[in-house]
Image (cartoon, rainbow, N blue to C red):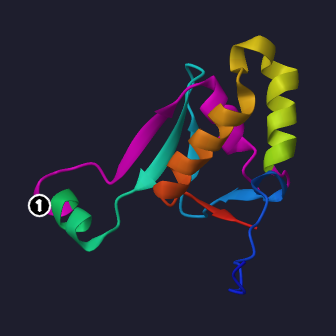
Amino acid sequence: MSLAVKKKQKNLLTMTPILKDRYELDHASDGTTRLVVPRDGWLERLSVRFFNQPESIKVRLDKLGQYVLSRCDGSMTVQEIAERLEQDFGESAKPILPRLVKFLQMIEANEWIRWE
């Protein structure tokens, strides 16, 4: 058995996802919700200025994505979000935990959330 020090692993279910301040949810009048992603990198600013590109990207969310991101405000853990998904969406959200974890992995990879 190795005496190497193991990294302290955190339990994802007890962690709290928080949508970063620079991103916002845009609730459209037609009932859809979009995540507004500003294009503020130096290359993106150039393309916005010289090629008439939009200043932000609007990512359309489905009902589950909208539901999860609206709860990424620091008040709920992943476990609490999963429980609420099951209560509010029932069978249509199953399998809840694998889908939720994959969605959180995707938005974390895009650096849209931070963890507490």
Name which quarter of the figure residue 86 lies in: top right
Q: Looking at this view, is 3 or 49 the one in front?
A: 3
The residue that appears at 76% across and 12% down in the rendered structure is: 91
The residue stretch that appears in magenta: 49-77
Residue at 79 percent across and 29 percent down: it is: 85
Quarter of the figure with the C terminus: bottom right
Left or right of 98? Residue 55 is left
Residue extending farthest to the front is: 1
Marks counted in the figure total 1
The answer to whether residue 76 is left or right of residue 45 is right
Q: Is residue 43 magenta-colored?
A: no
Q: At 85% from the left edge and 32% from the top edge, which residue is drawn?
A: 84
Q: Is residue 64 magenta?
A: yes
Q: Of 50 and 92, which appears nearest the observer?
A: 92
At a point 69% along the width and 65% down the height, the residue shown is 115
What kind of element bears circle 1? helix
> Whole-percent x and y of residue 19?
64, 56
Amino acid under label 1? Answer: Phe
Task: Read off the residue under disc 1.
Answer: 50
Q: Answer few, some or many: residues within 10 Å of disc 1's Cα (few below 14, many 20 plus, some between 14 and 19).
A: few
